Amino acid sequence: MKQPLGVILAGGQATRMGGGDKGLLQLGDDPILTHVIDRMEPQVAGLALNANGDPARFARFGLPVVADSIDGFAGPLSGVLAGLDWAAGRGADHIVTAAADTPFLPADLVPQLLLAGGDQGLALAASPSGRQPTFGLWPVALREDLRAALTAGLRKVVQWTQRHDAGTAEFPDDAAFFNVNTPDDLATARAML
């Protein structure tokens, strides 16, 4: 299997943080998104950012910005589809996704997902607290199936991945998937850093 492309999912509404882009919040000397990029970039063949609205706000990161193609806020699967469409245009077979608000994501995310993906090449990450549905390996070959499911109203990642016998990559540490959803979470992340 070719090295997958990476897509950082930053299309959420950040309602618990009061709106805005969580990935642009400062964590140490850099925005959270810089930490995510630094962990993802060495693991993938190329990297894009899934975000809606004005892409110029992410210009400093030098990544292509791909917007959701499904109207309305359709959740992370819509971002996965946008990433799959971008990857298809680049001739890639797979993408790996990660959330833009998880600065401590595993340094071995991609190899573990590839191992768990099996023949189908579809897998989600999991930690002791459960599945981590924004961290996955997604085959470009399933993008039209995903588009049809989203158009029909499906929004739950696990519902769709179970239809396709997704593998599970088990990670031992919940801290690797710690995400910044609230001001208190940001304070915790600063302490973890």
Image: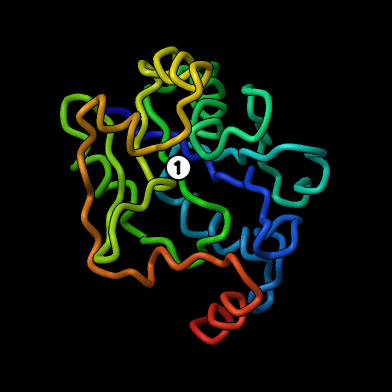
Mark 1: give few (<14), some (14-19) or many (20+) Cα within 10 Å: many
Residue extending farthest to the front is 153
For residue 176, above or below residue 185:
above
For residue 30, above or below residue 155:
below
Position in image of residue 40 (x %, y %): 47, 52
x 25%, y 61%: residue:
171
Instruction: Report whether 13 appears left or right of 175.
Output: right
x 46%, y 13%: residue:
148
Residue extending farthest to the bottom is 191
Position in image of residue 15 (x %, y %): 68, 57
Instruction: Report whether 31 appears left or right of 156.
Output: right
Seen from the viewer's position, the closer of residues 131 and 143 is 131
x 74%, y 63%: residue:
18
Position in image of residue 79 (x %, y %): 55, 34
For residue 14, above or below residue 164:
below
| Location of mark 1 (residue) | 97
Seen from the viewer's position, the closer of residues 2 and 9 is 9
Secondary structure of the residue carrying numbered label 1: strand
Position in image of residue 3 (x %, y %): 35, 34
Q: Amino acid at mark 1?
A: Thr
